[in-house]
Structure formats: C-alpha cells, structure tokens
Image (spheres, rainbow, N blue to C red):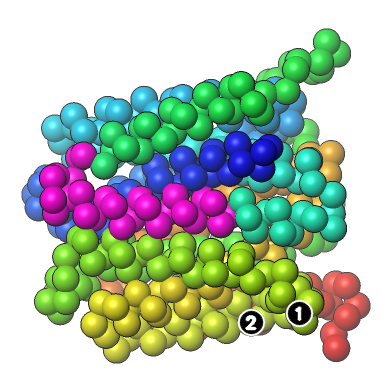
Amino acid sequence: MLLFFISLCGIASAIAYRSVDPLVTVLAREFSVPVATAALVSSAYALPYALGQPVLGPMGDSFGKGRLLAICLSILTVTLLALPFVTSFDMLIALRFIGGLAAGGTIPVALALVGDKFPPEQRQLAIARFVAAALVGQICASSLAGLFAEIINWRSFFYVGACVTGIAALGAAFKLAEPRKPDAPRANLLQAYQSYPVIFRNPKSLLCYGAVFLEAIAVFGILPYVAEILETHQLGGPKEAGMIIAGIGVGGIIYSLILAWLMRYLKRTGLMAWGGGLGALGLLACIFIPVWPTFFALITLLGFGFGMLHNTIQTEVSSLAPQARSAAFSAHAFCFFMGQAIGPVVFGLGMHHLGLTPIIILHGLLLAVVGFGAAYLFARQSGDLR
C-alpha cells in the first residue's frame, strides 16, 4: 500500500510533464509561433525541474520527504488548473516554469522514499514498479492529451491532470508525511548543500550522473517533434503523435513486467549494455519515417531499452549515499532533466541545419555509446570485466 501512494505521486508528475508533447503543433498555431518555439514548452518545464534539485532534494532529507511531496504536488495542481485560462504564449511558458519547479520535488523525492523503505535486495524491483506507475501516467498524458485536443480542445486535458495531482497531494499529506522529530534539524539553504560532498566522494556518482544526462538528450530530443514529423509526412496529427509518444511508457512498462526474469540472466552492466543497444536500434529505425503504428512500435522499443538502462542507473544512485538519498536522487534528476531540457533544443537545431535523418542517427549513436560505455565503466569499477 505504501508503494501505491508513492507511485501515485509519480503518476501525477508524469501526467503534468508529458501532457504537452503531442500538442506542440496545436500550440504553434494557437499562439502564432514557430514549431521550434512551441517545443520550448517542454524545456520550460524540464529546466526549472532540474535547477530546483540542488535545494529540493536535501530539503526532503531534513524537512521530510512526504511533507515536501504534499507541498510540491499542491503547487503543481494550481498551475495545471490555471493552464486552460492562458491567453498568451508567454503566460503558458511562465506557468510551465512554475509547474516544473514544483514538480522537481516529486519523483526524485519519491524515489528516495522507495530507497528508504525497501531493502537493497528488493530495491531495483520496487524502483522499477514505481517507474512503471509513472509511465502509466506518461502514457495516459500523451495519448489522452492528443485525443482531447482533437475531440474537445487542447486546454481540456489539464483539468484531468489537476484532478490527479490534487488526489496525489492529499495522499502524500495523509499517508506519506513522516511525524516531525523533535530533534530534527531545520531545513535551510546551508543544510541543502551539506549532503553533496558526501555523494560526490563516491566514485560512481559522476558516472551515474553523466550517463543520465546524455541518455536524456538522446531519448527525449525527438518527442516534441513527433507531431511535426507526422504532419509533414501526412501520417497523422496530435492524436497519432500522442499514441506514438506513449510508446516510451509502454516500453518501460514491458521492461518492468519482465525485470524479475531478466535479472536471472543479466547483471546490472548487462542490462545497461542491452538497454543502450535496443534503445538505439528503435531510435535509428525511425529514420525510415514509417506509418504511425510502426512508428509507435519503434518508440516502444526505444522505451524498453531506455527502461533497462535508466532503471539500472537509478538503482546505482540509490546506494551512492544512503544517509543523503534524497540529495543523491535530486542530483540525478538535475542531470536527467537538464538533458531533457537541452534535448529538444539540440534536436531542433540539428533538424534545421543537418536534416531529420542525420540528427536521428546522431541521437541513436549517442544512446548506444552511453549504454555500452556505462556498462564497461561500471564493470571496470567493480573489477568485473568478464
């Protein structure tokens, strides 16, 4: 039951984030801006999410993880309720920025809570199940937002998102908030920075954080442009784009369902290598711009490979500094969401200057290098290069 309420927080955060990806071309027409500018609504959420991590994570360790989850989800709910009433693109960007800042105190803190509550031998499976739940939110957000945009209007799905985040905020407040210890230190900015030297004394920290930064650029750069790719090649609109983007989540869920079986045959480094390779294969095959159901299958393969690589790195992060687990996961989220903020910008510039096929190839090769490189470097650190 505890994992259910923690997972609900992940679902809410994922819904808030991924609900705009299939709407990029709709937003471009609504506010009379270029598609590349409209795609910045994704970066406008990811960037503050990342920038808030150096403070929010350690505050979870000292202020209380459940308490911080409740506050951040409440603020996120308010921003989602306000989104249907925006009248300018600048207002939309501002609300996404505030929402991203608040959301920075959700998934990393929830992951740290999983690390606190589950012993090491159960932790990778528990983290995978939490991530699977967040991916359900991602699937619902991307597929339903595109569907709502075609049937009703693009603003309507944000009411659904606000409802889910509001319920998650209540669940965090009443089911996850820890009792305040009388001798607990007050949360302050100085406290927020004291955990990081402990984390970075672990030699695995730079490897974990560098890998998630690069994988985020490789995987998430293409997503805001799926709708434009489909429309350019007359293969569909926001509805089809939402379904394709949902493939990332579908692949991650498939991975979580068979993880226990995979762990019988593969070590963590094997999961990293296979994840990078399979994800790169799915992404590289997108250069053929197939019909949208095949596009969905390829993005699902990308999501499966990404899940293998990303979940394994998350498990390593959970053990970097057990006494500062929220800070460790927040540093992880900082790098991951900086990559997600930069990814669409890099992909957009590459598509404009190089062309669609070359930029997809570059992102696919980057993902392969991250997967195989991380596997090799982790194996070398552990002395197991077999």
Q: Residue at x 68, y 54 (%)?
A: 127
**Which-is-in-front pick, marks 1 and 2?**
1
- Look at the image and tell me whether residue 231 can be seen: yes
* Coordinates of residue 383 in the picture (x, y in percent): 91, 78
Residue 57: name its quadrant: top right
Please provide percent x and percent y for residue 280.
Answer: 50, 81
> Does residue 61 appear left or right of residue 356 in this picture?
right
| Residue 183, placed above or below residue 3 | above
Circle 2 residue: 274
Determine the main secondary structure of the stretch shown in magenta.
helix
Does the CB distance between marks 1 and 2 fall below 8 Å?
yes
Label 2 element class:
helix
Residue 37 coordinates in the image, percent (x, y): 22, 54
Cα separation between marks 1 and 2:
9 Å
Q: Is residue 230 above or below residue 104?
A: below
Disc 1 is placed on an element classified as: loop
The quarter of the picture where residue 22 lies is: bottom left
The residue shown at (65%, 62%) is 311
Q: Nearer the viewer, residue 76 or 50?
A: 76
Q: Amino acid at mark 2?
A: Trp
Which image quarter: residue 376?
A: bottom right
How packed is label 1: few (under 14 Cα within 10 Å), some, or many (20 or more)?
few
Q: Amino acid at mark 1?
A: Leu
Task: Say whether residue 7 is left or right of residue 32.
Answer: right
Which residue in the protein does label 1 denote?
Answer: 266
Of residues 79 and 347, the one nearer the viewer is: 79
